[in-house]
Image (spheres, rainbow, N blue to C red):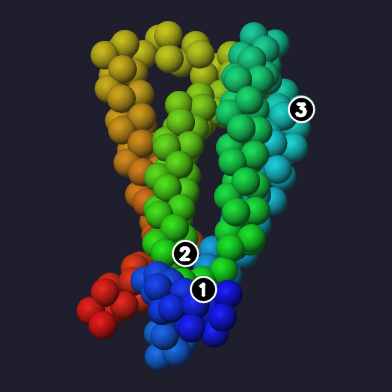
Amino acid sequence: MDFNDIQNAWKNEPIENVVLPNNLEKIQSVNMPLDKIRKNLKKEFIVQVISMILVPIIPLFINLKYSFFLAYYLLYAVSIIISIAFAIRLHIYYKNFANVAATTKDNLYEIYYNIRLFIETYKSASYTFFPFGLFYMFLLPLGKKSGKLLNLISNTNQEYVLVIVILIVFVFVILMWFMTEGHTKLFYGKYAKEIRKVIDELKEE
Protein backbone atom coordinates (compact mmCIF):
# COMPACT_ATOMS: atom_id res chain seq x y z
CA MET A 1 0.00 0.00 0.00
CA ASP A 2 1.57 3.34 -1.08
CA PHE A 3 1.20 6.74 0.56
CA ASN A 4 -1.85 7.71 -1.54
CA ASP A 5 -3.70 4.54 -0.51
CA ILE A 6 -2.97 5.25 3.14
CA GLN A 7 -4.16 8.85 2.74
CA ASN A 8 -7.40 7.75 1.05
CA ALA A 9 -8.05 5.12 3.71
CA TRP A 10 -7.53 7.76 6.40
CA LYS A 11 -10.01 10.10 4.74
CA ASN A 12 -12.63 7.34 4.58
CA GLU A 13 -12.46 6.60 8.32
CA PRO A 14 -15.79 7.40 10.12
CA ILE A 15 -15.50 10.56 12.20
CA GLU A 16 -18.73 10.57 14.20
CA ASN A 17 -16.96 9.28 17.34
CA VAL A 18 -13.94 11.56 17.04
CA VAL A 19 -13.84 13.96 19.97
CA LEU A 20 -12.87 17.50 19.13
CA PRO A 21 -10.55 19.24 21.60
CA ASN A 22 -13.15 21.87 22.56
CA ASN A 23 -15.63 19.07 23.47
CA LEU A 24 -13.12 16.85 25.24
CA GLU A 25 -13.10 18.95 28.40
CA LYS A 26 -16.89 18.84 28.62
CA ILE A 27 -17.00 15.09 28.16
CA GLN A 28 -14.28 14.50 30.74
CA SER A 29 -16.12 16.74 33.23
CA VAL A 30 -18.60 13.85 33.60
CA ASN A 31 -15.92 11.88 35.46
CA MET A 32 -16.47 14.06 38.57
CA PRO A 33 -20.18 13.20 39.13
CA LEU A 34 -19.42 9.63 38.06
CA ASP A 35 -16.81 9.41 40.80
CA LYS A 36 -19.39 10.69 43.34
CA ILE A 37 -21.77 7.93 42.26
CA ARG A 38 -19.04 5.32 42.67
CA LYS A 39 -18.31 6.53 46.23
CA ASN A 40 -22.01 6.52 47.16
CA LEU A 41 -22.41 3.02 45.72
CA LYS A 42 -19.52 1.80 47.84
CA LYS A 43 -21.09 3.31 50.98
CA GLU A 44 -24.45 1.79 50.03
CA PHE A 45 -22.88 -1.65 49.70
CA ILE A 46 -21.21 -1.38 53.11
CA VAL A 47 -24.47 -0.28 54.78
CA GLN A 48 -26.29 -3.18 53.13
CA VAL A 49 -23.77 -5.71 54.47
CA ILE A 50 -23.86 -4.20 57.99
CA SER A 51 -27.68 -4.29 57.96
CA MET A 52 -27.68 -7.98 57.06
CA ILE A 53 -25.44 -8.63 60.08
CA LEU A 54 -27.30 -6.43 62.61
CA VAL A 55 -30.93 -7.29 61.79
CA PRO A 56 -30.77 -10.91 63.07
CA ILE A 57 -29.09 -9.77 66.32
CA ILE A 58 -31.84 -7.31 67.37
CA PRO A 59 -34.36 -9.89 68.71
CA LEU A 60 -31.72 -11.23 71.11
CA PHE A 61 -31.91 -7.95 73.06
CA ILE A 62 -35.69 -7.41 73.20
CA ASN A 63 -36.88 -10.78 74.57
CA LEU A 64 -39.48 -11.62 71.97
CA LYS A 65 -41.99 -14.34 72.73
CA TYR A 66 -41.17 -17.60 70.95
CA SER A 67 -43.98 -17.23 68.37
CA PHE A 68 -42.84 -13.70 67.47
CA PHE A 69 -39.21 -14.78 67.61
CA LEU A 70 -39.94 -17.50 65.06
CA ALA A 71 -41.95 -15.12 62.84
CA TYR A 72 -39.11 -12.58 62.93
CA TYR A 73 -36.50 -15.05 61.71
CA LEU A 74 -38.76 -16.53 59.07
CA LEU A 75 -39.22 -13.00 57.79
CA TYR A 76 -35.48 -12.39 58.00
CA ALA A 77 -34.78 -15.58 56.00
CA VAL A 78 -36.90 -14.24 53.14
CA SER A 79 -35.53 -10.69 53.36
CA ILE A 80 -31.91 -11.88 53.46
CA ILE A 81 -32.33 -13.54 50.05
CA ILE A 82 -33.52 -10.23 48.58
CA SER A 83 -30.79 -8.33 50.45
CA ILE A 84 -28.04 -10.58 49.11
CA ALA A 85 -29.38 -10.27 45.56
CA PHE A 86 -29.52 -6.49 45.96
CA ALA A 87 -25.99 -6.34 47.40
CA ILE A 88 -24.71 -8.35 44.43
CA ARG A 89 -26.44 -5.92 42.05
CA LEU A 90 -24.85 -2.99 43.87
CA HIS A 91 -21.43 -4.61 43.53
CA ILE A 92 -21.97 -5.25 39.81
CA TYR A 93 -23.02 -1.65 39.18
CA TYR A 94 -20.04 -0.40 41.20
CA LYS A 95 -17.65 -2.49 39.09
CA ASN A 96 -19.31 -1.30 35.88
CA PHE A 97 -19.01 2.36 36.88
CA ALA A 98 -15.45 1.83 38.15
CA ASN A 99 -14.33 0.37 34.81
CA VAL A 100 -15.75 3.12 32.61
CA ALA A 101 -14.47 6.59 31.76
CA ALA A 102 -16.05 9.41 29.80
CA THR A 103 -14.04 9.66 26.58
CA THR A 104 -16.55 9.80 23.70
CA LYS A 105 -20.13 10.92 23.12
CA ASP A 106 -21.29 7.34 22.66
CA ASN A 107 -19.57 6.40 25.89
CA LEU A 108 -21.38 9.28 27.59
CA TYR A 109 -24.79 8.02 26.48
CA GLU A 110 -23.94 4.55 27.80
CA ILE A 111 -22.91 5.95 31.18
CA TYR A 112 -26.09 7.98 31.50
CA TYR A 113 -28.31 5.04 30.49
CA ASN A 114 -26.64 2.75 33.05
CA ILE A 115 -27.06 5.33 35.82
CA ARG A 116 -30.78 5.75 35.03
CA LEU A 117 -31.14 1.96 34.95
CA PHE A 118 -29.41 1.68 38.33
CA ILE A 119 -31.68 4.35 39.87
CA GLU A 120 -34.81 2.49 38.76
CA THR A 121 -33.35 -0.80 40.05
CA TYR A 122 -32.54 0.85 43.38
CA LYS A 123 -36.08 2.22 43.73
CA SER A 124 -37.65 -1.14 42.87
CA ALA A 125 -35.48 -2.92 45.45
CA SER A 126 -36.32 -0.31 48.09
CA TYR A 127 -40.06 -0.67 47.47
CA THR A 128 -39.68 -4.45 47.81
CA PHE A 129 -38.41 -3.94 51.37
CA PHE A 130 -41.48 -1.90 52.41
CA PRO A 131 -43.53 -4.94 53.59
CA PHE A 132 -40.56 -6.28 55.54
CA GLY A 133 -40.10 -2.90 57.18
CA LEU A 134 -43.75 -2.89 58.21
CA PHE A 135 -43.53 -6.36 59.76
CA TYR A 136 -40.35 -5.46 61.61
CA MET A 137 -41.98 -2.28 62.86
CA PHE A 138 -44.89 -4.25 64.32
CA LEU A 139 -42.78 -7.11 65.69
CA LEU A 140 -39.93 -5.25 67.37
CA PRO A 141 -42.06 -3.44 70.02
CA LEU A 142 -43.39 -6.84 71.13
CA GLY A 143 -40.73 -7.54 73.71
CA LYS A 144 -41.53 -8.29 77.37
CA LYS A 145 -44.74 -6.29 77.08
CA SER A 146 -46.05 -8.31 74.12
CA GLY A 147 -48.63 -10.11 76.28
CA LYS A 148 -50.01 -6.86 77.70
CA LEU A 149 -50.08 -5.28 74.25
CA LEU A 150 -51.96 -8.23 72.76
CA ASN A 151 -54.48 -8.17 75.63
CA LEU A 152 -54.98 -4.44 75.09
CA ILE A 153 -55.62 -5.00 71.39
CA SER A 154 -58.04 -7.86 72.03
CA ASN A 155 -60.02 -5.75 74.56
CA THR A 156 -60.18 -2.73 72.28
CA ASN A 157 -62.88 -2.14 69.70
CA GLN A 158 -61.64 -3.99 66.62
CA GLU A 159 -62.80 -1.20 64.31
CA TYR A 160 -60.53 1.26 66.13
CA VAL A 161 -57.64 -1.20 65.94
CA LEU A 162 -58.19 -1.63 62.19
CA VAL A 163 -58.29 2.15 61.64
CA ILE A 164 -55.09 2.64 63.67
CA VAL A 165 -53.29 -0.14 61.76
CA ILE A 166 -54.39 1.32 58.40
CA LEU A 167 -53.19 4.80 59.46
CA ILE A 168 -49.83 3.42 60.62
CA VAL A 169 -49.36 1.52 57.36
CA PHE A 170 -50.36 4.56 55.30
CA VAL A 171 -47.99 6.91 57.16
CA PHE A 172 -45.17 4.36 56.98
CA VAL A 173 -45.55 3.84 53.21
CA ILE A 174 -45.70 7.60 52.55
CA LEU A 175 -42.63 8.28 54.70
CA MET A 176 -40.66 5.44 53.10
CA TRP A 177 -41.65 6.62 49.62
CA PHE A 178 -40.41 10.15 50.34
CA MET A 179 -37.22 8.79 51.91
CA THR A 180 -36.53 6.53 48.91
CA GLU A 181 -37.19 9.27 46.36
CA GLY A 182 -35.18 11.82 48.34
CA HIS A 183 -32.30 9.41 48.86
CA THR A 184 -32.02 8.47 45.18
CA LYS A 185 -32.20 12.12 44.08
CA LEU A 186 -29.59 13.23 46.61
CA PHE A 187 -27.10 10.39 46.12
CA TYR A 188 -27.62 9.56 42.42
CA GLY A 189 -30.28 11.64 40.68
CA LYS A 190 -28.53 14.99 40.91
CA TYR A 191 -25.35 13.52 39.40
CA ALA A 192 -27.36 11.93 36.60
CA LYS A 193 -28.79 15.40 35.88
CA GLU A 194 -25.26 16.84 35.64
CA ILE A 195 -24.34 14.19 33.07
CA ARG A 196 -27.57 14.79 31.16
CA LYS A 197 -26.77 18.51 31.09
CA VAL A 198 -23.40 17.79 29.44
CA ILE A 199 -25.10 15.54 26.87
CA ASP A 200 -27.64 18.28 26.03
CA GLU A 201 -24.85 20.86 25.67
CA LEU A 202 -22.97 18.59 23.25
CA LYS A 203 -26.14 18.12 21.20
CA GLU A 204 -26.47 21.87 20.71
CA GLU A 205 -22.94 22.22 19.33
Q: Give above or below for 99 relative to 156.
A: below
Name the spot of residue 5 as percent of width and height, x first. Answer: 49, 77
Note whether residue 26 is visible: no
Q: Residue at x 42, y 9 (%)?
A: 154
Work out whether residue 108 or residue 178 is closer to the camera in this orientation and state it.
Answer: 108
The tag on residue 8 is none
Horizontal side, residue 76 vs residue 169: left or right: right
Q: Residue at x 36, y 43 (%)?
A: 177
Q: Disc 3 designates what residue? A: 60
Amino acid type indicated by mark 1? Thr
Q: Are marks 3 and 2 in contact (CB under 8 Å)?
A: no
Q: Crowding near pointer 1: few (<14 within 10 Å), some, many (20+)?
A: some
Q: Disc 1 designates what residue? A: 103
Q: Disc 2 designates what residue? A: 107
Q: Are marks 1 and 2 in contact (CB under 8 Å)?
A: yes
Locate the C terminus and report the quarter of the image it occupies: bottom left
